[in-house]
Amino acid sequence: MVDKVKRLVNKPEQIRNIAICAHIDHGKTTFSDNLLAGAGMMSEELAGKALQLDFHEDEQERGITIDTAAVNMVHSFEDKEYLINLLDTPGHVDFGGDVTRAMRASDGAIVLCCAVEGTMPQTETVLKQALREKVKPILFINKVDRLIKELKLSPEKMQERFMDIIKDVNKFIEQMAPEEHKQDWQVSVKDGTVAFGSSFHNWALSINYMQNKGITFKDIIEAYQEGEKWRELGKKAPLHEVVLNMVIRHLPNPKEAQKGRIPAIWHGDKDSALGKSLINCDPNGPLVFMVTKVVIDPQAGEIAAGRLFSGTIKRGQEVYLNLAKKDSRVQQVYIYNGAKREIVDDIPPGNFIGVGGLKGAYPGETVSVGKIEPMEKITHIFEPVVTKAIEAKKPSDLPKLIDVLVDVSKEDPSIEIEINKETGEHLMSGMGELHLEVIENRIKKEKGVDIETSPPIVVYRESVTKISPQTVEGKSPNKHNKFYFKVEPLNENIIKAIKEGELPEGRIKKEDKETWKILKEKGMDGDEAKKVRDIYKGNVFIDATRGIVHIGEIIEMVLDMFEDVMKKGPLCREPCFGVKAIFEDVKLHEDAIHRGPAQVYPAVRSAIKMAITISNPVLFEPVQTLRFEAPVEYMGELSNIISSKRGKLEEMDQKEKRIKVIGKLPVAEMFGLSSELRSATEGRGSFSLIDQKFEKMPGNLQEDIITRIRERKGLGPNE
């Protein structure tokens, strides 16, 4: 097998990098098992039961995928061999960060959709993540056996069901796909970009396959009606053959994909030698490898997995980590085979690979030879909104816990770790209760540290509601430098563009015309857009100073402090969002020795904080829009749950004997929601996340919550 893979890594036209993505429980991992069995990498009897790519103990226990798993497989199509680099991604919304990172490494996506449930909120979320990364989707409608056996639908009714799902997916592609692909990325049965089948029973059909093999849909229905005859379907129309043929036919190879993807994910000069090498996936060009996942292996140490976009990576090669700003060396190069890795000497671009020895590389790191413009930051659709304080049960385990927390944030960058050396408090923020619970269990079981955690705490945001009534002056400790600031609320369209990833975050170069253009489109004045110097966590910094002689020497320090205040606002040290900070003027001492960091930092920090304090600052809380589903007789229970949690019922829809309810709930009220829903609906209700945003907290709760947060953080009245 490894020899076959080695033979194909040099042939980019015969490579497909694909991710499998779907809503939770729509059958992704069973589907992946079938593809592995078809490629001869596991027994057919075990396919769908072994869950080969869920190789963490907790994934097998919970029956859900938590980590993206990678595997390389070889498939023959029309007398040619193809290398399929496959990533099986999680479906639970709490692990959505893993999906976004997998998309950066892929060129195509198989979107799985359950024939019974249809498109669900997380189907839309994963599709959105794929389209944002310019990854082309194809559709597989799974669990068709249930339509025949359980729902006993007629062929016409089944066809209607399929058409509804395809229509939903296409509507979403039209909304979210890049302009140039809104039409040509639409999926359809006719052109072969849709297949349907049952990954549990190991069969699939597409229009091409039905025409070539003379199988009709009637044959499938009859097979289920005639006792055990359905068992033969896996031989007649094997899932792996139908799906991988579809992948090879309709998803791009790395060379084709990089032509369209590189301009979207790399903002360097496209006409430079490096730009051309990236666009052409050139094995002889400069090295560019992007880390999308870090796995800590007890034997091999840190393995950085990711996509090689340009150049050939070799064992022993000296490289540079652009974000960590340090040199490193490639110790090992791996190709993937499920949980196993195989060592190779070198690999050309267009492949998904593992690299050993890159100490300090986090997901999102761009690895090259020498300093280059890094790849665009990977932005996630949802942010961490739940935090727990975490401590070691035994004081002697404290140093080990700190190392483990650093490892955890590498393995899952959607987890935010804050280690406060002064207070000794360690905070871990994640996407939800389940996310934090899984990480806690891994720290205990896999990392071997006994820990205690606090009850979950909600992460709030601070913002302003009006323009500063006056300009605020910040004086340096030596009184020789003065900084003048104002703040105001940021335009809603700009906040949305930052959240959706349209506006890249980071410090802005003087001639970034692309960013200016987007800012103008979103409603910012053209002259002001040219003065934007930093976009940080949903906030914007504007340098409106004029003709200041030494501005170049201090501007980076000023931006450091802007970012520092945005991380911890003045109300109760929660992160800020939607704040526009305007740097209006500055008076600087002639002598450089009197305007160093010790003078600039406190002056800028206090001025921005004071400007926020006089601009009517308020707390915003995370609010989630959820879709609840249950049998129709539980309609009353669902609306009671929503109203008892400060929630708002937005939509109600009844289909046959089931009710679908859309509700908006504050995250602070949602702890324990799963068990409440289970008991209220006798285990027959479920919910999933549609959207998440921060909304202004009701005025009557503001003061109480601010006081509680300040007490929890031990902040004095003037801190």
Image (cartoon, helix red, strand yellow):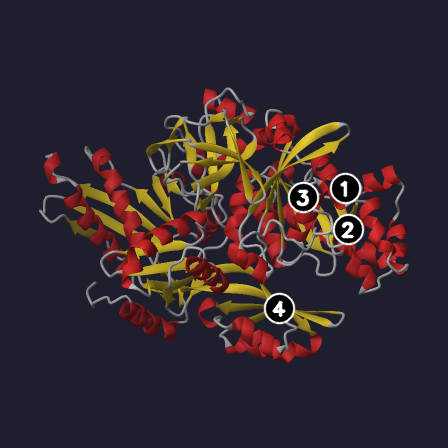
Mark found first going from the N terminus, 4 or 1? 1
Disc 3 target residue? 36
- Disc 3 to disc 2, C-alpha distance: 17 Å
Q: Nearer the viewer, mark 4 or mark 1?
A: 1
Q: Are marks 4 and 1 in contact (CB under 8 Å)?
A: no
Q: Is mark 4 on a helix, strand or loop?
A: strand
Q: Do the residues labelled 3 and 1 touch (CB within 8 Å)?
A: no
- Disc 4 to disc 1, C-alpha distance: 33 Å
Can the viewer see residue 577?
no
Front residue of 74/506: it is 74
Q: Which amino acid does label 4 sit on?
A: Ser
Disc 4 target residue? 686
User: Which corner quadrant holds the N terminus?
Assistant: top right
Mark found first going from the N terminus, 1 or 2? 2
Indicate whether 612 appears above or below 651.
Answer: above
Q: Which amino acid does label 1 sit on?
A: Val
Q: Nearer the viewer, mark 4 or mark 2?
A: 2
Q: Residues within 10 Å of mark 4 (few under 14, many from 20)?
A: some
Q: What element carries label 2?
A: strand
Task: Locate residue 710: give its quadrant.
Answer: bottom left
Indicate whether 10 appears above or below 68.
Answer: above
Disc 1 target residue? 242
Q: What residue type is labelled 3?
A: Leu
Disc 2 target residue? 197
- Disc 3 to disc 1, C-alpha distance: 14 Å
User: Which corner quadrant holds the C terminus?
Assistant: bottom left
Mark found first going from the N terminus, 4 or 2? 2
